[in-house]
Each structure stands twice: as C-alpha cells, then as structure tokens.
Image (tube, rainbow, N blue to C red):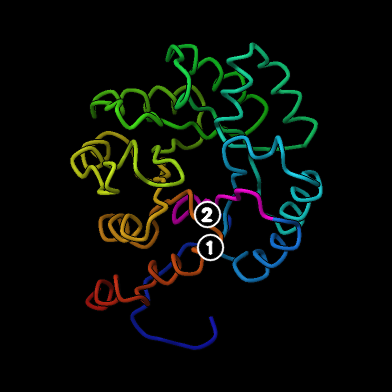
Amino acid sequence: MNYMLKSIPSRTVKPRNSGFTMAMDKGLSLREVEDFIETSGDFIDIVKLGWATSFVTKKLREKIEIYRSAGIPVYFGGTLFEAFVIRDQFDDYVRLLNDFQLTFAEVSDGSITLDHDEKCGYIASLSKEVTVLSEVGSKDAAKIIPPYKWIDQMQKELNAGAWKVIGEAREGGTVGLFRDSGEVRQGLVEEILTQVPEEKIIWEAPQKEQQVWFIKLLGSNVNLGNIAPNEIIPLETLRLGLRGDTFDFFLDK
C-alpha cells in the first residue's frame, strides 16, 4: 500500500484460498489486458474468459500467455463447456484445455439440462487433469431452485472433485443467487452457509450492492466472482473499508 492507515482489515495474500477475486474478461484486447494487470494484478486471483467469448477472441493464445506470465490463471467460461457437451464433444473440450495448457476448468449446467450424476461424472473426470470450478444455479430467471437443492448439488460437486463451487448470478447479477432486481436471496445464501463451508464457495456478485452485502455478511475475505476489470480496485477498497458503503464497518473491529 502507498501509506499507512490504522484499523484496516487483514487481507489474505496470493495464492489465496479465501478472499478470492475472480475477474471476468468479456473481450479485452491484448493492450487492455496488459493495462489491467499493471493496475490490478495484485488483486486478481483468476480470470474467466466469459461464457464462450474465447471462440471469437482474436489472439487468444497471446492473451492467455499475458495472464500466465503475470501468474494469473485463466479458464474458459462454463457456457463453453456446455456448448461442447450438448454437441457430444466432451473429448474435444478436454483436448482444447490441453492445447491451451489451461490448468482450470469450469463445469456448469446453467444453459442446458444435465442429469446431476452426469455433471458430477464430468467433474470427476476433469479433476484428474485440471482444477475444477463447478457452477450451481440456472441462467433462467424463471427457474427457482430451492435451497436444499443448491446445498445438495454443491456438496455432491465438491465430493466429485470440484475445488470450489460457484453460485450462479450471470454477468448481470439478476438470476440464481439474486432476484431480477439484483436483490440478494438472503435466505438462500444463509441456508447454504449452514451446510457448505464458505471458503469452498465463490459468490458471483457483479453489482456493487451485492459485493457490499457479502462483505458485510462474511467479511473482507469472502470469495467473489464475475467482477468487471474496472471494478477490481473499487472492490478491493470495499474489502478494506475505504469506500462509503463499508466505511464504518471495520472501524470497531
């Protein structure tokens, strides 16, 4: 940090297991990636190339190498996994991961209907080769999954080999964990936390109000995902109580 302030909450340091920030790259240019890393690299734990943007991204290998050189892992969004699976191309997906030398993969079923045992089979298979992040929740705002199913699926996916589970919200933060207004489904989150360890969950929270809510519930070192590149530093100030929304929250602590 550039100077000293008292009563700043303690933050974990990289490589982190908690206090994890997953950034979403929805099509940054190589130059933008370099600038992004220069300004925010210390606060980025992993980057998701959103949904299937990698299919159309120019200079994809070069982009991945820039992140890799900075010590920041990259993975393809879960929608790309689903696009391969729905076309009966899972083996091609595995070859793709190997071709790009990716060490992380996301398994999701937010856009397709996938038997949960089958999903866990994909997790088990991939976890032998890479670190798996599995996503729970639907991208369909009309599909409301009851809390007991979230808990059951998260537990089974962790048991199948997922390193962490991701609570679905999409890039807009209006499905899954949230109502279409962006409001947190508070009862759902609190019930999940009675059964699933918080360090095993990454909460997708693209909106500032959502980030504030999770920080106030679970502290500075909550795992958050789907953070836009230009929101990484603002999020870090929220985590440290240096923005109006969390300004008073850590002073007494």
Rendered image: mark on residue 16: 2
The residue range painted magenta reads 16-28
Label 1: which secondary element: loop
Residue 3 appearing in the image: yes
Q: Residue at x 57, y 58 (%)?
A: 44
Q: Residue at x 44, y 35 (%)?
A: 165
Percent from the top left, x then y, of residue 42?
59, 66
The answer to whether 179 appears left or right of 159 in the picture is left
| Distance Cα–Cα, label 1 vs label 2 | 6 Å
Q: Is residue 90 above or below residue 235?
A: above
The answer to whether 200 appears left or right of 189 in the picture is right
Marks 1/2 in contact by CB < 8 Å: the verdict is yes
Percent from the top left, x then y, of residue 95?
76, 23
Label 2: which secondary element: loop
The amino acid beneath tag 1 is Val
Percent from the top left, x then y, of residue 129?
68, 27
- Please tell me in which quadrant of the rendered image residue 35 appears: bottom right
Sort mark 1 into few (<14), some (14-19) or many (20+) by Cα contacts within 10 Å.
Answer: few
Percent from the top left, x then y, of residue 87?
63, 14
Q: Residue at x 44, y 15 (%)?
A: 113
Q: 4 or 39: nearer the eye?
A: 39
Q: Residue at x 31, y 28 (%)?
A: 150
Where is mark 1, residue-wise? 13
The amino acid beneath tag 2 is Arg
Residue 151 appearing in the image: no
Q: 171 or 253: nearer the eye?
A: 171
Look at the image and tell me in which quarter the C terminus lies: bottom left
- Please tell me in which quadrant of the rendered image residue 7 appears: bottom left
